[in-house]
Amino acid sequence: MSVLVLAETDGKQLKPSTYQALTAAQAWQLPVDILVYGSELDAATTAARQLNGVRRVLVAQAKHLQHPLVEDVQELVLSVASQYTHILSAHSVFDKSVVPGIAARLDIAPVTDVIEIRAPATYVRPAYAGNILSTIENPQPLQIITVRATAFKPAAPREGNGADAELVVIDVPPTRGLSQWIGEQLTHSDRPELNTARVVIAGGRSLGEQFDALLNPIAEQLDAAIGATRACVDAGFAANDLQVGQTGTIIAPELYIAVGISGAMQHLAGIKDSKIIVAINHDPDAPIFKHADYGLVADLFTALPELTGALQQH
Ligand code: FAD
C-alpha cells in the first residue's frame, strides 16, 4: 500500500499547496511518493526530494507539460495509478479539474475538499458553505482524495543529513491533443499571494470606487494581501481574483481584517480558519461581529485612514 501525491508547480518551484498535501498524505503512515511534472523541474524536484516523509519523487518531464493541460496530466497519473492504493492532491483550481477525470476512468468516486483524514478511510469535509462538517467513510479499494490545503500545515524539509528521497524518471505518455495551450495573462503583484499570505485585509462593496485607495496603503504597511467580497467584485470595485469565500479563494491567514463586510455565510466559508479575525463595520449588528475576535464599530472611511496613519508612525 502506498500514496501518490500530485505536486503543483508554478512552472519551476513547488507551490505551497504541495507541502500541505504532503502533510495530509502522512495520515495513513504509508510510503508516500510525489509526482512532479512539467518541463523545467530541477528546483521542484530538489525541494521535493528533501521533504520529510517522501519515499520517491516521480519526475515526468516533457515539452508538452510546460503548460500542463488537464487531459495530459490525467493520462500521466493514470500511467502510474496502478502502483498506488491512495492518490491525493490539493483541492486547487487545477487539480479540481484533473482529479474527477482520473476517478471516472478508474470507476472510483473521489472524496473532495477534505479537511481531516482519519486513517484508514474516514474523512471530514465541509458542506453547505462550511455550515456543516460531514464525516464520511470511503470503502472503495482505491482512495482518491483532494484536500483543502489550508487545513494542513506545510511539510518541512528533512532534518539532519538524511539521504534525499529516491528520484525516478518516468515515461510520459504523449499528449492527447484534446486541448491546446494558447496563452495566459498573469497579474503581477508585489503583494503576497492571497491564499498563502500571513495577513489579509479585505473590503466589501461599501468601499466603492475607493477600494484601492483605501486598502493599498494599509496593505503596504502590513505586508498584507488584499481580498474582496463577491458583492464588491460583482460591482466592479475589485478584480475577480481577489474574491474570498465559497466561490472564491479559501484562506487561513494569521490575521484577517474585514472592512465594511457584512459576514454572509458564503464569505465566512472562505475565512473561518483564519487565526485572528478583525472586523470594521458601522453596523453593530453586522453578522461578521459574531465571528470576529476583535470588532471596531466605526465608519470605515474615517477608521481606515486613521489606522493607516497610526501604522505609519511605527
Ligand atoms: P453587503 O452584504 O452589502 O455588506 C456591506 C457591509 O458594509 C454592511 O455590513 C454595512 O453595515 C457595511 N458598511 C456600509 N457602509 C459602511 C461604512 N461607511 N463603514 C463601515 N461599514 C459600512 N460572497 C463572498 O464574499 N464570497 C463568495 O465566495 C460568495 N459566494 C457566493 C455564492 C453564492 C452561491 C451566493 C448566492 C452568494 C455568494 N456570495 C459570496 C455573496 C454573499 O452572499 C454576500 O452577498 C456578499 O458576501 C456580501 O458582500 P458585502 O459584505 O461586501 O456586502
Image: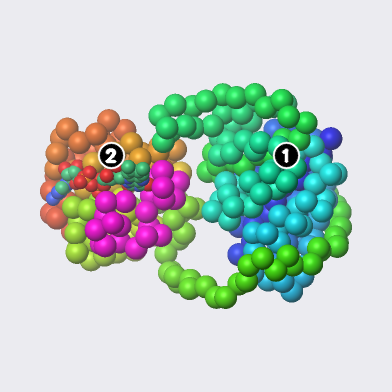
Which residue corresponds to mark 1?
A: 107
Disc 2 C-beta below 8 A from ligand 1: yes
Tell me the distance, in whole angstroms, between the alpha carbons under discs 1 and 2. 40 Å
Observer-nearest of 140 and 261 = 140
Residue at 49%, 53% (x, y): give it: 196
Look at the picture and state if 124 lies above or below 180: above
Residue 148 visible in the displayed image: yes
Q: Main secondary structure of the magenta part?
A: loop
Callout 2 crowding tier (Cα within 10 Å): few <14, some 14–19, many ≥20: many
Q: Quadrant of residue 67?
A: bottom right
Observer-nearest of 124 and 180 = 180
Residue at 34%, 63% (x, y): give it: 239
Give the quadrant of the C terminus. bottom left
Which residue type does callout 1 highlight? Answer: Asp
What secondary structure is marked by label 2? loop
**Rendering coords of residue 299 (x, y %):** 13, 48
**Rendering coords of residue 43 (x, y %):** 71, 66
> What span is colored magenta in the figure?
230-251
What secondary structure is marked by label 1? loop
Which residue type does callout 2 highlight? Answer: Gly
252 relative position to 175: left or right: left
Which residue corresponds to mark 2?
A: 263
